[in-house]
Amino acid sequence: MDAQSDVNRGEFTWKISYFSEQEATRLYSEAFTVAGCKWRILVFPKGNDTDHLSLYIDVPDPVALPNGWTRKAKFHLSVIDQTNNGRSVRKGTEHVFAARQIDRGYPSFIPLTELHNYAAGYLANDTLMIKVEIRVLAVTPPVNIQPARPTDDFDSLLTSLEELIIAAETNGVNVGSSLGHRDGTLTAKIPSLEEVEKAKLSLKECLSDLFKLNMKERLFKALSTLSSARTRLSPKQRIAIDTFLANFNDFTSDFLTFEQDNAEFELQKLQKDQWLAAMTKCHEAHIVCKQLMGELVKEEEELERKMEEVKSRKDKLFLDWDVVRAKSEEAKSGYKDKQKKVAEAEEKKRIAEERMSRSTTAWSNLKTQFC
């Protein structure tokens, strides 16, 4: 999925290889994420009870979502013409996805006859290319939108490497060659029987293996000797020799060209195998990096979870602190109020004590006089 400046927008492209050979009634793409929500493409290669390609956007694993979930989204689905983008078919709508409406799309997106018309480019190399563009308008309950993981960028690289490696391992290169023997006619003196036998032996040795550059003169000499012979050759042997000699330069040039082209092929094949080995090594390294990245992402998620716990405890502590501060203010105010009232009561007590002292003195005098 291509990165967007708006986290609520995203797009995803799905390539289905060997599309005309698909036997399944329906096919699902891998899940992709936009605005923190997972989505996938659903396609019916032979139509959903129609003679058209049926194409939808779908919410994967809806049972794992919380009760009452909804997603309001605006989206466009496209079937790409890979030879003329102007002929690409694009349709869009807006929909609220929910537990009872997990997909939305078009049962009759494009006629199957038009899709399979190879004059168009919808199935270039028997590959169907589907693109979805989506904008999430609202989500219930809200989700925390996470930034794209580093491994998301690796996935497209991993997929392309795997496809290249599989293709290289399963598709061989077949090189065929058509080799013929041609000859020309030359006039020369009649060779002796011994020369004829030597020429035959030399010819057999030349013909025992594919033509080589160092055989050219030897082969020409043997054929010339045998062409001039009057005996020890059958009519068919004479015809074969004359035919080859008549086109000697052309035929030997064909052999030499083959040798050069074959050597070039072997060199290119060797270099291709070397690049395949390098690509395989990169693929293996990519797997290791992705595994390590996955472990780091999990570690990061665990740290984020712990940070959320710490933040929650911190927020609770602030709340408790606020309660303590309120009670402190209340106690302070109460203390000051009581302090004032104690001072007032103390003054009253002093006055009462003075009066009590006077009364006590009078009482004592009275008691002294009469008791």
Image (cartoon, rainbow, N blue to C red):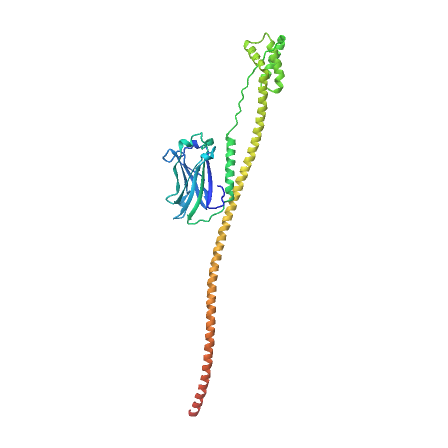
Q: Residue at x 55, y 9 (%)?
A: 235
Q: Viewer-proximal residue, 181 or 294?
A: 181
Tell me if residue 310 comes above or below residue 222 in the rendering: below
Q: Residue furthest left?
A: 49
Tell me if residue 269 comes above or below residue 292 in the rendering: above
Residue 249 found in image quarter: top right
Q: Residue at x 47, y 43 (%)?
A: 10
Q: Is residue 307 visible?
A: yes
Count all numbered tags in the image, as a single digit.
Answer: 0
Q: Viewer-proximal residue, 10 or 214?
A: 10
Tell me if residue 277 comes above or below residue 365 in the rendering: above
Judge left or right: residue 320 versus residue 253. left
Position in image of residue 257 (x %, y %)? 58, 22
Judge left or right: residue 257 versus residue 324. right
Q: Residue at x 47, y 79 (%)?
A: 347
Position in image of residue 329 (x %, y %)? 47, 67
* Quarter of the C terminus within the rendering: bottom left
Q: Is residue 210 visible?
A: no
Position in image of residue 277 (x %, y %)? 56, 34
Residue 181 found in image quarter: top right
Q: Residue furthest front?
A: 86
Position in image of residue 295 (x %, y %)? 51, 45
